[in-house]
Amino acid sequence: MSKVLYIKANIKLEGVSRTFQVSDHFIEEYKKQHPEDEVVVLDLYKENIDFLRPEDLEAMADINDETKKNTTFLKYAFQFAEADKYVIAAPMWNLGSPAILKAYFDYITITGITFHYTAEGPKGLLQNKKAVHIVARGGEYGNAPYEMGDRYVKTILGFLGVSDIQTIAIENLDIIGADVEAKVKEGKEKAGLVAKEF
């Protein structure tokens, strides 16, 4: 049995968020194909993820303190490390991802939990795991040099040791005359196919 961590990073609600329309469909199809797996939903806005504070830096220095594992932001790092698969649903905002997703990655990128330092430099501890990033974009940014959302997600996950990363992008949603419903439907179809093999 695998544990899937479904990370949602959009202030818009289900049904309104085009990213969530596709990512929720992905999860539905995944559950059909993998009924024995556990899916844990983590909505970053409902969790009130914040920016790191001085006391958080102190907690980072003592990750072996059992009292801090469930009472501080460190619980998110341990939760992330314990998962086998990651589904990250985050739209493109201003060429990147919502700031709350970056704040979340600051929470989970912790020495001794998700990566460590060796004589050769930093090395990710999350080997043999896989991820899919689902993103809705207003225009076509897939290969643009200024696309920094998906690029960052893949880079930070790679830093943590996750090498099997796919992207499901729904693009050109805000172009004048775009058939948004058709594009979302196309995104769902792709999500369904990826979910079967994920």
Image: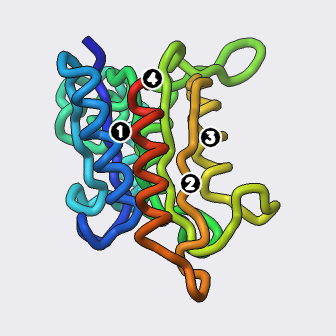
Q: Nearer the viewer, mark 3 or mark 4?
A: 4
The residue that label 4 is drawn on is 197
Q: Helix, strand, or loop for circle 3?
A: helix
Q: Earlier in the sequence, mark 4 or mark 2?
A: 2
Q: Helix, strand, or loop for circle 1?
A: helix
Residue at mark 1 to residue at mark 4: CA–CA distance: 38 Å
- Does residue 52 sit above or below 141 in this rendering? above
Say which quarter of the image contains residue 161.
top right
Dot 4 amino acid type: Glu
Q: Residues within 10 Å of mark 3 (few under 14, many from 20)?
A: many
The residue that appears at 34% across and 68% down in the rendered structure is 17
Dot 2 amino acid type: Ala
> Is residue 98 toward the left or the right of residue 117 in the image?
left
The residue that label 2 is drawn on is 169
Residue at mark 3 to residue at mark 2: CA–CA distance: 13 Å
The residue that label 3 is drawn on is 154
Q: In this rendered view, identify the residue nearer to me: 195 or 177.
A: 177
Residue at mark 3 to residue at mark 1: CA–CA distance: 27 Å
Q: On residue 171, which mark appears?
A: none
Number of marks in picture: 4
Say which quarter of the image contains residue 93.
bottom right
Q: Helix, strand, or loop for circle 4?
A: helix
Q: Helix, strand, or loop for circle 2?
A: strand
Say which quarter of the image contains residue 108.
top left
Residue at mark 1 to residue at mark 2: CA–CA distance: 36 Å
Q: In this rendered view, identify the residue nearer to me: 102 or 193.
A: 193
Q: In this rendered view, identify the residue nearer to me: 77 or 45.
A: 45
Residue 22: horizontal and vertical position, in percent? 38, 54
> Does residue 22 appear in the picture of this structure?
yes
